Image: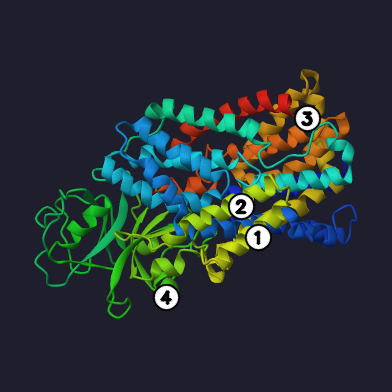
Amino acid sequence: MTWEAWVTLGIVGLMAVAVLRRLAGPDTVLLAGLALVMALHEFFPKFPGVREAVAGFGSQAVVTIGVLFVVAEGMRQTGAMAVLTRPLLGNPRSLPAAQARLMLPVAGLSAFLNNTPIVAMLMPVVSDWCRRTGFSPSKLFIPLSYAAIMGGSCTLIGTATNVFVYGELRAASAADPALTAGNDELGMFSISLVAVPAALAGIAYLLLASRWLLPDRGTVAESSDARRYTFEMQVDPGSAIDGMTVEEAGLRRLPGAYLIAIERADEQRIPVGPETRLHRGDVLVFAGALESLGDVSRTKGLSRTTREPGTLPDDLVRVEAVISDRSPLSGKSVREGRFRTEYDAAVIAVHRGGEHLEQKIGDIVLRPGDTLLLEADDRFTERFRNRPDFYYVHTLGAAEEVRARKAWIALAVLALVVFAATVCGMELLTAALLGGGVMVVTGCCTPHEARASINWRVLLMMGAAIGFGKALDSTGAAAAIATQLVDTFDAMGPRAILVAVYLAAMLLTTIIGPVPTAGLMFPVVVAVARSQGYDLTPFAVTLMMTAAASFASPSAYQTNLMVYSVGGYRPMDYVRVGLPLNLLVMLIVVLIVPVVWAF
């Protein structure tokens, strides 16, 4: 292997470490890696130059995904997804029935729409459903995320990974027709032959195993652990409780909440004993369910530390917001993020899975997936719903305003896109452009909403992944990895190589996500196919299916992070439920793919 190949693989290793240590998001890391190989080209021509490195940003796959975001936004703004799902949810009598009623329609919708807006729109619906039926949110939110992931793999437009790999497969086939001579070109539903059985098997697995593997952290009404927020109050000077002990002030046995720390000047007292005396200006840090915040707020002598005169409008509402992995707040404390100044809102509580946050609110360093309880004006949700800062924004106690009268128009537009791309043989990009344009023209979404809906981070990741993939190819790194795979597994047959590709992609997906993984692995499978004379198609389809191998970590897929805090989960919940599901999908892929697409 050449030294250029070793350098390229070293950069890949550094990128993986940067993502694992959360030094930056995958898009930033990939762009930095791409910039580095472009700089190296100035001195060493084996690395890709500017023209080759940036060509991916203008690829058909990248543009197609960008336009499909607009189609999904039209569906979201009209509430079309809720129109389909609410009647199906109904009033199930058992948990398996509830999970089936949730997962089947979600998987069906995700086959045609980006799954992030689907999960975002259904989160408040599922929360309300849990309150009405008494089911534990922890039994339903992971199934919601997993069903969206599995359903997205069922068509070419269901996930960005599928669109990306399909575009790369067409480009590779155009450059070397012999690579795909043994199989027909993939159509809209070609991947359904393997993805639908995998999705059905995955749903069956969750229905059977979730009783034991998914945590049960109580109903919405009773679960303080599932939705345990950290919030704080301050002892008013001269109040009745100034000088009392914690026990005397009635703060020892609060319903649904407990006092975890007292901040006094620069001193923090943990744990807090019943004999601890309260002093004026003490900041009391509580942990408890959302409902307990109101009970604590009514304690005489305590006031909210987050409310300062003149900083917030009078007409306040409570808002829940989930921090996204591309939020400028991620990695900063609440104080460093200048939340009041930047968002005109106050953070009054923070929830992070099953963790106990014992710092003051201002000192909590925010992470992707954290749920914030905010006090804000009644237009906060409208202003920030489409911003990349948050996965999900919802005003508590308020129904989201949607253009319900146009829901059926949005559904018809989606059907038109699928019909044009399948029956009429129209290019997927052309069909998506027409669909996005009709969404805007008919008022299903405004031009501003259409622009705001585009996830530029995903597009940057795709473009950078294509460019870095060229570095793996031009330096010989991809060929070296392919040679190692073939030498190790070829004696056991091409299925063994397929298993090795899947396992490697599954590991990378858990670390950096499915789209960057597909970009880095595609040159490798091309080199494998070329060196052994195999058809590239079964390897490309296997790479598509690694998007459905994102179950074992909350950070492996956006929807996993979105439901992490809302469902009250811990990282091991994803490992316990998701790792067997990853392996189940692999088994189905390895059994079916070679039968449908010959080597």
Badge number at residue 416: 2
Question: Toward which corner of the image does residue 241 lie, by quadrant?
Answer: bottom left
Q: Amino acid at mark 2?
A: Leu
Query: Is residue 491 rendered to the left or right of residue 208?
Result: right
| Left or right of 481 in this view: 434 | left
Contact, CB < 8 Å: mark 3 with mark 1? no
Image quadrant assignment for residue 503: top right
Mark 3 vs mark 1, CA separation in Å: 43 Å
Measured in 3D between alpha carbons, the distance from the residue under mark 4 to the one under mark 2, in whole angstroms, is 44 Å
Q: Quadrant of the N terminus?
A: top right
Q: Identify the mark nearer the N-term, 2 or 1.
A: 2
Eye-nearest disc, 4 or 2:
2
Sooner in the amino-acid sequence: mark 1 or mark 4: 4
Q: Amino acid at mark 3?
A: Leu
Residue under label 3: 485
Front-most of residues 111 and 48: 111
The picture places residue 280, in percent across and down from the top left corner, at 18, 69
Can you give x and y, in whole percent of width and height, for residue 117 in the image? 50, 53
Q: CA distance from mark 3 to mark 2?
A: 43 Å
- Residue at horizontal 36%, vertical 35%? 98
Real-space Cα distance between discs 2 and 1?
Answer: 9 Å
Residue labelled with disc 1 = 434
Position of residue 431 measured from the top left corner of the image (x, y, whole percent): 68, 55
Pointer 3 or 2: first along the chain = 2
Q: Are marks 2 and 1 in contact (CB under 8 Å)?
A: yes
Q: Tell me which residue sits at (37%, 46%) in the image.
A: 126
Q: Amino acid at mark 1?
A: Leu
Q: Nearer the viewer, mark 3 or mark 1?
A: 1
